[in-house]
Image (spheres, rainbow, N blue to C red):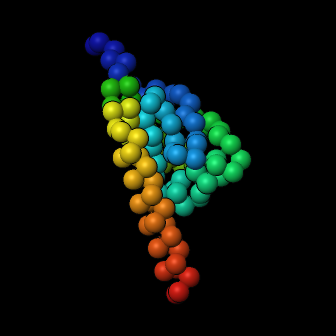
Amino acid sequence: MKFDEDNQLQLDIAMVTSKGLHFNGNIYTNATMIKNKWFEQAEREGIWQIPILFWRSNQDSLILFESGSYIIATSVENNLCPSETLEIYQKQLRALKERYFEKKKKH
């Protein structure tokens, strides 16, 4: 049997920044990171590193460790994506969060 390194989980480090989770030129996010305000914290306190698992053959998603469990982060941007697209995504995400919290305050 031939060992296929591309299909094995790899361990590496990703950077949490104000713009998202950066790894290998891609930006990742998920509901847990948004809920726990990782990106706002990175903007206030600076970037930090976290261990991640990934498949070399498919980097559309990463596996992160959070509070004793595993969570999946999905790629939302890569090097082929224009910066304007990222800015639009981030603006829409902020607007969505604001609407969510306003609605939550009313209830």
Residue 23 visible in the current orientation = yes
Image point (65%, 39%), residue name: 48
- Position of 53 relative to 70 (above/below): above
Residue 30: where, in percent of width, then height?
Answer: 46, 52
- Position of 93 relative to 62 (above/below): below
Image point (51%, 28%), residue name: 11
Residue 97: where, in percent of width, then height?
Answer: 49, 66
Furthest residue toward front = 84
Image point (56%, 82%), residue name: 105
Please state the total of marks drawn on the protein image.
0
Furthest residue toward right = 45
**Quarter placement of the N terminus:** top left
Q: Is residue 49 rendered to the left or right of residue 34?
A: right
Furthest residue toward bottom = 107
Judging depth in this view, the residue of 71 and 45 nearest the camera is 45
Residue 61 visible in the current orientation = no
- Position of 103 relative to 88 (above/below): below
Image point (41%, 60%), residue name: 92
Quarter of the rendering containing residue 74: top left
Residue 68: where, in percent of width, then height?
Answer: 59, 49
Residue 39: where, in percent of width, then height?
Answer: 58, 51
Furthest residue toward left = 1
Judging depth in this view, the residue of 86 and 40 nearest the camera is 86
